[in-house]
């Protein structure tokens, strides 16, 4: 199994990456999130910009993969910078927490509505899960509520690297890793739940010895093995 860390855009104000992650295991390809909408990211003055090198589909093409080759998309959550290209993977199964999809479809979190036309597409197949789920011996979904209702993180076990914890927006930067002292952003819906999830992910990382990937941490990403390199 190989894990690619894909930068699918840049948050312009802080220079932070917009991540997606690709897991390749033999003939099976799984994406974790789909990044910011490629077309919207073409605006150089936008909140998020997407350069040609950050184009998700271009990066997949460099690995000789097409959207139809992606069999599964794990949705940490449906914020615009995490679900902006769902509509480009009509053949995939989308794995999402039931609580989150219910909240998204009810309009409970306003900002998710901004790209509803990308994730609430007729024909997209959603697999609903509840809480922690072992998708395989090397792939575990970890409930990490708070940033939005039903957020989930992903624990990957690689043969050589060992465990890697994709924290998602439950812990977006290393400066948010302390549950008690971490800042709560305007994008975090439930502060108490955010702190509980932060503590839980820290405990999982300590127990497993996992490398924790903070998705919006520009300084950390400069030290990581990012695309076209990978972890295996």
Image: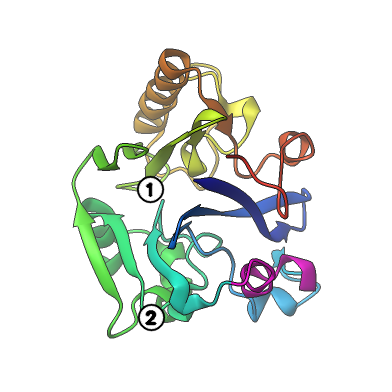
Residue 214: x and y in percent read: 60, 37
Residue beneath the point at 61% across and 40% down: 231
The mark nearer the N terminus, 2 or 1, is 2
- CA distance for labels 2 and 1: 25 Å
Q: Is residue 109 magenta?
A: no
Location of residue 94 with respect to 152 vertically, above or below: below
- Circles 2 and 1: CB distance less than 8 Å? no
Pick the quarter of the image with the C terminus. top right
Location of residue 203 with respect to 14 vertically, above or below: above
Secondary structure of the residue carrying tag 2 is loop
Q: Is residue 130 visible?
A: yes
The mark found on residue 90 in the picture is 2
Badge 1 local density, few (<14 within 10 Å), some, or many (20+)? many
User: Observer-nearest residue: 117 or 66?
Assistant: 66
The mark found on residue 62 in the picture is none
Q: Which residue lies furthest to the bottom in this view?
A: 122
Residue beneath the point at 50% across and 76% down: 67
Left or right side of 182 for 175: right
User: Observer-nearest residue: 40 or 3?
Assistant: 3
Mark 1, residue position: 148
Residue beneath the point at 39% across and 56% down: 75
Quarter where residue 131 is shown: top left
Secondary structure of the residue carrying tag 1 is loop
Residue 52: x and y in percent read: 78, 73
Residue 128: x and y in percent read: 20, 58
Residue beneath the point at 50% across and 43% down: 169
Badge 2 local density, few (<14 within 10 Å), some, or many (20+)? some
User: Observer-nearest residue: 167 or 176?
Assistant: 167
Q: Give the range drawn in magenta.
A: 52-64
């Amino acid at each position: 199994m190989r894990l690619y860390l894909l930068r699918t855009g840049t948050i312009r104000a802080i220079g932070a990456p917009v991540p997606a992650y690709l897991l390749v295991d033999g003939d099976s390809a799984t994406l974790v999130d789909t990044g910011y909408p490629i077309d919207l990211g073409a605006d150089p003055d936008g909140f998020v910009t997407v350069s040609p090198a950050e184009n998700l589909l271009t990066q997949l093409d460099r690995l000789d993969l097409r959207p139809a080759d992606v069999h599964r998309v794990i949705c940490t959550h449906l914020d615009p910078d995490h679900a902006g290209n769902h509509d480009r993977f009509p053949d995939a199964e989308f794995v999402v927490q039931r609580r989150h999809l219910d909240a998204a479809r009810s309009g409970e979190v306003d900002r998710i509505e901004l790209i509803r036309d990308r994730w609430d597409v007729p024909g997209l197949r959603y697999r609903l899960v509840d809480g922690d789920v072992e998708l395989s011996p090397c792939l575990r979904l970890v409930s990490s509520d708070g940033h939005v209702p039903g957020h989930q993180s992903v624990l990957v076990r690689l043969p050589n690297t060992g465990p890697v914890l994709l924290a998602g927006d439950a812990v977006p930067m290393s400066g948010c890793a302390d549950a008690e002292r971490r800042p709560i952003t305007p994008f975090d819906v439930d502060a108490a739940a955010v702190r509980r999830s932060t503590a839980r992910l820290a405990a999982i990382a300590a127990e497993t010895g996992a490398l924790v990937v903070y998705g919006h941490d520009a300084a950390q990403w400069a030290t990581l093995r990012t695309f076209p390199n990978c972890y295996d």
